[in-house]
Amino acid sequence: KAGVTQTPRYLIKTRGQQVTLSCSPISGHRSVSWYQQTPGQGLQFLFEYFSETQRNKGNFPGRFSGRQFSNSRSEMNVSTLELGDSALYLCASSEGQGDGYTFGSGTRLTVV
Amino acid sequence: DQQVKQNSPSLSVQEGRISILNCDYTNSMFDYFLWYKKYPAEGPTFLISISSIKDKNEDGRFTVFLNKSAKHLSLHIVPSQPGDSAVYFCAAQETGANNLFFGTGTRLTVIP
């Protein structure tokens, strides 16, 4: 079956702009989580959606938001981009606990 | 506050020898632990997990050990192979939680 698909793979934006990233989960997976990976910080949890509802949110400013559609596809949005938002953004879909998480290849966002 | 810590950013091991990757955690509510492996330009892939009711779990060349009293886990790879060269992330989860807490990763290099 198809894996987790994230688009686009690479993105360059200017400070102050906003960006939307997309994630299509594995078919049948209703939970979608987003993580930010930066050097030295590992993967930091952003938020998790299940059946279109945000169930959990990490410690990120309100500029980071997300949503999930009825087909389980998810988007995350970052507004008023800052240089520090440059990172690899990873999406994971799952049916349950940790070993059920499947990650996409990520979107590499560079803010200049 | 980093609740899961991997204090060794890198490790080099000769092919055929044992690789030992370490991870410490601070949250006593964590009861499920995982190791993920990540190659460049790919998302993390699940490797092996362990529940807090166990102290060891083995899967082929990979064994994870958990010491709850020390809040420490380790991943042993025996024998190490060049294809094992990657970044390894330790992750932890609380029962019923919908997110993983990741360490900052250890880059393993297996020298042929």
Image (spheres, coloured by chain):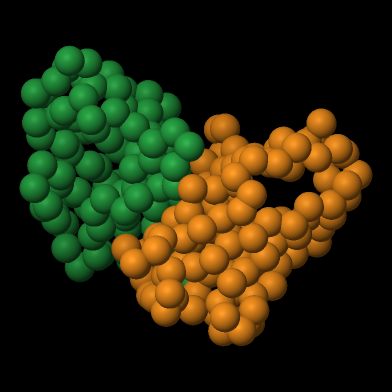
Chain colours: A orange, B green
Q: Would residue B57 be seen by someone viewing this image from the given angle? A: yes
Q: Is residue A104 above or below residue A23?
A: above
Q: Is residue B58 left or right of residue B42?
A: left
Quarter of the image containing the C terminus of chain B? top left
Q: Is residue B106 above or below residue A71?
A: above
Residue sitting nearer the eye, A86 or A25:
A25
Q: Would residue B6 be seen by someone viewing this image from the given angle? A: no
Q: Is residue A97 above or below residue A23?
A: below
Question: Furthest-front residue in view?
Answer: A1
Residue A108 coordinates in the image, percent (x, y): 62, 41
Q: Is residue A17 left or right of residue B42?
A: right
Residue A1 coordinates in the image, percent (x, y): 34, 67
Residue B14, image quadrant: top left
Residue A61 coordinates in the image, percent (x, y): 78, 57
Question: Furthest-right residue in view?
Answer: A16
Q: Which residue is found at the position 49% from the left and 48% from the top?
A: A105
